[in-house]
Image (tube, rainbow, N blue to C red):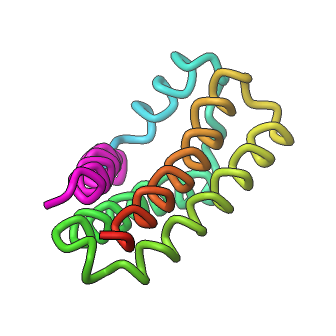
Amino acid sequence: MSKAERAIVIILRVIGIAGLFATPAIFLPFSWMDAIHGWLGLGELPDVPIVRYLARSLSAFYAVMSVLILYLSHDVRRHRGLLKLWCMLAILFGFTLWGIGWEAGLPNSWTLAEGPPAVLIGFVVLWLQRKLDVH
């Protein structure tokens, strides 16, 4: 396994494992979600059906995507085309999150910790993939 391939595998596995930490939030009592929301300095979490639905479904989506990312990490050469698409989507998603966070008035620390890293990771994995194509 080349250094570039190993780096891609590590990046994907770190992202995949980190994303799985969203799984417990699917089942958290709403009062815990509200407490975490307040602890983050975001005030009281509105107790309305759409907020409950979005909090849990987004956590489930992160968990599902994390399993997919972990699967792709097991053969990055074979899944090269799908990984390239994932990189482009990660870049687009990162810029989108950045804009959504800014428009929503989230703290800069939140906005900068979510969108820009996704953009950076997308570009880094694309760059590493190009190194794979050379070897």
- Classify the position of the C terminus by image quarter: bottom left
Give the magenta-colored segment's residue range.
1-26
64 w.r.t. 27: above or below: below
Give coordinates of residue 95: x percent, y percent.
72, 52
- Confirm whether residue 98 shows in the render: yes
Q: Total label count?
A: 0
- Confirm whether residue 24 shows in the render: no
Give coordinates of residue 53: x percent, y percent.
53, 60
Residue that appears at 24% across and 56% down? 9
Give coordinates of residue 126: x percent, y percent.
50, 62
Question: Foreground residue, 31 or 60?
Answer: 60
87 w.r.t. 9: above or below: below
**Picture quadrant of residue 16:** bottom left
Question: Foreground residue, 120 or 5?
Answer: 5
Answer left or right for 102 relative to 90: right
Answer left or right for 11 relative to 104: left
| Extreme residue toward the front, this view | 134
Answer left or right for 29 relative to 53: left
**Picture quadrant of residue 133:** bottom left
Residue that appears at 36% across and 41% down? 29
Give coordinates of residue 101: x percent, y percent.
74, 40
Question: Foreground residue, 27 or 133?
Answer: 133
Answer left or right for 92 relative to 126: right
Residue that appears at 53% across and 56% down? 122
- Classify the position of the N terminus by image quarter: bottom left
